Amino acid sequence: MGRRHDLSTRLASLVEIGDIMTAMKNLAFMETRKLASFLSAQRIAVDAMENAIADFTSCYGRNPPAETREICLLIGSERSFCGDFNAQLARAGEEILPGIPVVAVGSRLANLAPDLLIPGANVAEEVEPVLAALVDALEKMQSAQGSALGITAIHHEEGSVKSRRLLPLPDLPSPGYSHPPLIHLEPFDLYEKLSGQYLYVALHEVLYSSLMEENRRRIDHMENAISRLKEKVERLRMRFNQMRQEEIIEEIEVIMLSVDPHASS
């Protein structure tokens, strides 16, 4: 009886764990639906920004190259249960930008001992404060160095790890307009403002894309774990039923052995 009781307690615990994992999977799924809307709007903003940059630089050129300090921006996860999400980022960072100072977003990247670690977003609504903290940190780094930053972001997007150059502004094909755009600032000043604005909208897209992929990984991870858990629960239930049957047989045998053979006469 004691072993069956222990098995019953274990079964109840596993079922409860399964319910928690299912809830986590459902929350991740709902987050992907919400992020899909945010990400779609942000990509429209990035496309509009890149069109404006291409229009401007095709007519007014780019500012003279300045001395830059290169940094690697790793966008990881704040939470676990997303497989090798962060391990893939770490490997990509070492391969793409070896020896470059690292700014990491996401507490799960703390084991990499980055030069700067910023807590990441758990849900879409937390992207804005994370972005504000990141931009503030980058501005302080630039002021401390006294030189412009060359920023390359390494992040997850649509099933793979991507490397994206954020600053200086990307080289974009000319739209081929016949007349230059009207501007109300000096080209040098406008270029600097475009750089800052592009960094802001591009980081939005990078953070949303990473969070989307993180939740997709979490869904897959949870589905696999739930499937394995269900198999284990089924095996334990079979063992539980088998033990119960054995106990019933033992009880019947005890009853049969206790019957007086002369009672019927």
Image (cartoon, grey):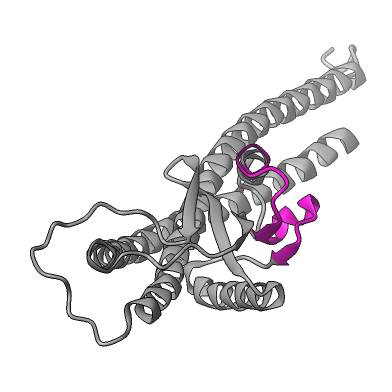
For the N terminus, the image quarter is top right
Q: Nearer the viewer, residue 181 or 166?
A: 181
Q: Position of residue 113 (x, y in %)?
A: 80, 55
The vertical placement of 126 against 34, above or below, is below
Outermost residue, bottom side: 184
Seen in the image, is 7 located left or right of residue 132? Answer: right
Seen in the image, is 165 located left or right of residue 100? Answer: left
The vertical placement of 213 against 179, above or below, is above
Residue appearing at x 25%, y 87% in the figure: 184
Q: Nearer the viewer, residue 12 or 201?
A: 201
Residue appearing at x 51%, y 71% in the figure: 127
Seen in the image, is 164 located left or right of residue 150? Answer: left
Q: Quadrant of residue 120?
A: bottom right
Q: Quadrant of residue 58?
A: bottom left
Q: Nearer the viewer, residue 236 or 175?
A: 175
For the C terminus, the image quarter is top right
Q: Is residue 17 magenta?
A: no
Residue range in magenta is 93-117
